Amino acid sequence: MRGPGLRLELEPALTATFAYGVSAAGGSARVCARVGDRILDLADAAKRRGFGQVDLLTAPTLDPLLAAGPDVWRATHAAVREWAADDDVRSLADVDLLLPFTVADYVDFYASEHHARNVSRILRPGQPELRENWRHQPIGYHGRAGTVVVSGTSVRRPRGPVPTEGGVQLRATARLDVEAEMGFVVGVPSALGSPVSVDEFADHVFGVVLLNDWSARDIQAWESVPLGPFLGKSFLTSVSPWVVPLDALDAVRIRSPSADTDLPAYLVETAPWGLDIDLELEVNGEVVSRPPYRAMHWSPAQLLAHLTVNGASLRTGDLVASGTVSGAAPDQVGSLLERWAGERFLADGDEVVIRAGGAVDLGEVRGTVAPAR
Amino acid sequence: MRGPGLRLELEPALTATFAYGVSAAGGSARVCARVGDRILDLADAAKRRGFGQVDLLTAPTLDPLLAAGPDVWRATHAAVREWAADDDVRSLADVDLLLPFTVADYVDFYASEHHARNVSRILRPGQPELRENWRHQPIGYHGRAGTVVVSGTSVRRPRGPVPTEGGVQLRATARLDVEAEMGFVVGVPSALGSPVSVDEFADHVFGVVLLNDWSARDIQAWESVPLGPFLGKSFLTSVSPWVVPLDALDAVRIRSPSADTDLPAYLVETAPWGLDIDLELEVNGEVVSRPPYRAMHWSPAQLLAHLTVNGASLRTGDLVASGTVSGAAPDQVGSLLERWAGERFLADGDEVVIRAGGAVDLGEVRGTVAPAR
């Protein structure tokens, strides 16, 4: 953990809900914060209070704040907390929220052992549940940054080639699924050729979002050998509008299961970044699953260390997703493929909400299925 | 083909070398053009000649020009050609060239049948050379946009986990390879949910670059199942500094081999976008291979149609690479894995140049191997 001097001393009530976003209030994009039940207009507050780094909060995205680094992040969190305690701060009601930052590269991992085993059992019965490489390193791939959208955007049922009895046909997917995930938002870039160690995670990552990695299982299964998922994933990825800063997660940091395994040095954490957070997956108003983030084999710090161990650089706005969060129990899985054993998927009009409550409020990511064009 | 009225009537000498780039002359990034043997300062020329869309040429990247669309592209090509014929235009000598555009998403395909078969024979002997899906659709994956660099950038030998006799170890790659490719640069965005048809290729794509998809074969082989290449590719991708507009390729457009196969409607071209271009792969001053682009099974218009058939949107700066260009003969392959049958790879200090000459001059992409840190 970071030393006490660096720790943000939030009141418990504020810890529960403390996040940054971008609203479309008044027709222009404005940086705002959600503190408890209130939404603060940070551009307005920063100007009126003479905030030292006003440019960071008057931009139309969180990008400048993300790039500013941990010292500025902490100073900003403290200032926002102070403003929130003051009654004359301008609050916003019923704001339309925008994608809060510019997504640079989007990388998606596969960090849940339960998910990897479940998918293997369903899609490749009789084969080894875990691939040979899985326990040695986090397995991941690059996704499409240009189709990351904010919560509320409807998901148009995608078309793609799938095998049918009459041969391979371009079809609307019959197996539209979700993946309940968390995404980690990079603020501070790293240099090409310089790996980011597990201990440097909080020097680079600003905060977290909830993420729904919409997936077309039939398209994905047919196309994925040997280069991985492509059309089956690239049509849409939804994120929550609120970015919760890492500082607000201190109380839920725990060791991840990989800490008890034999790891290469670059994946050994000296301070844990596993997260004791429960997600909730809801379809048409019914909670179908409660995926526990604490069961994720690899922590986000390990994901980032792996992503950069080959010298790949980070940019402000890189979005690093955990992969589907699945626990051991049938009602703890993060995809419908696992929940309903491949027998049932999303219908047109279905609404999916992923949220995280409890000790840390990450808000929600929501989307409704629109029929294929 | 486009109608004669839309065709840019370049002189043969100009057709041979006509490209846009960004120079670092005078300490600031400036849009320039290479026309024949001259490099023109377009910011200077556009201002002095009162060019109607001067903002497109006074930016520090090609991004605004890319976004402007085909009508403006044609008007700009014509203006540049006129300026080049004039002796008083400001020429630049020995310019340092920068990455000419902001890479949005980077997608890499696998469009050469010979490459797919060669790799399969070498890495998976005894298994079917072509996967079941390969002839039905272009196979591709997303790469890392943030590590696309301009020609001349050295490639630091990457580390990554590889299996060894003593178990999986974090090692500097022992199998550093190249892939000679062409990249297609998207100018005009497309809307989410609206596929771009093969016939709309030239409405969206501005031009082409040469591309070297540096690859660490040992890291790649170990990590790639089931999600595809990751660390084995993400450390660096190099592109040529000159973007050659599609208009300059009219004379080399041919039918690609897939045109003679049974294709789904969305991959059937009414006008061909196969390209009769010979690449050259040089290692330490010796040409080791001459990969013929005409042998590529899928045309770039087919790649773009596939990429968007699921509704994925395009952004200005999307870079769509062909995959390794390999022909049928042993001296026509685009990777060293194929050229030297996996027996020899790049050593520290080796310099690799990929160029394209002949009817269309695409310039070159160059890089030297730096030792692992």
Image (cartoon, coloured by chain):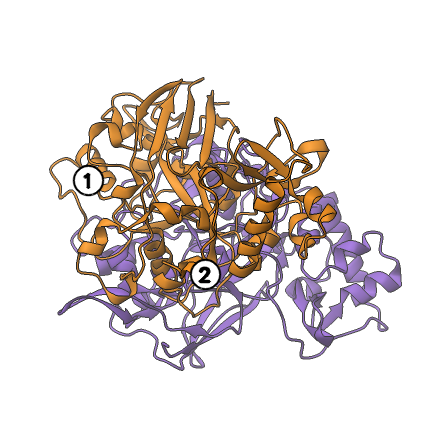
Chain colours: A purple, B orange
The disc placed on residue B5 is 2
Residue labelled with disc 1: B117
Question: In the image, are marks 2 and 1 on the same chain?
Answer: yes
On the image, the x and y values in percent for residue A145 come to 49, 55
Q: Nearer the viewer, residue B63 or A274?
A: B63
Neighbour class for label 1 at 10 Å: few (<14), some, many (≥20)? some
Q: Residue at x 75, y 44 (%)?
A: A5
Image quadrant holding the N terminus of chain B, namely bottom left
Q: Earlier in the sequence, mark 2 or mark 1?
A: 2
Mark 2 vs mark 1: give the one in front: 2
Q: Is residue A211 left or right of residue B306?
A: right
On the image, the x and y values in percent for residue B76 come to 58, 52
Q: Nearer the viewer, residue B2 or B69?
A: B2
Q: Residue at x 50, y 32 (%)?
A: B151
Spatial distance from mark 2 to mark 1, Cα to Cα? 42 Å
On the image, the x and y values in percent for residue B366 come to 46, 28
Could you tell me the amino acid type at mark 2? Gly
Q: Residue at x 21, y 39 (%)?
A: B114
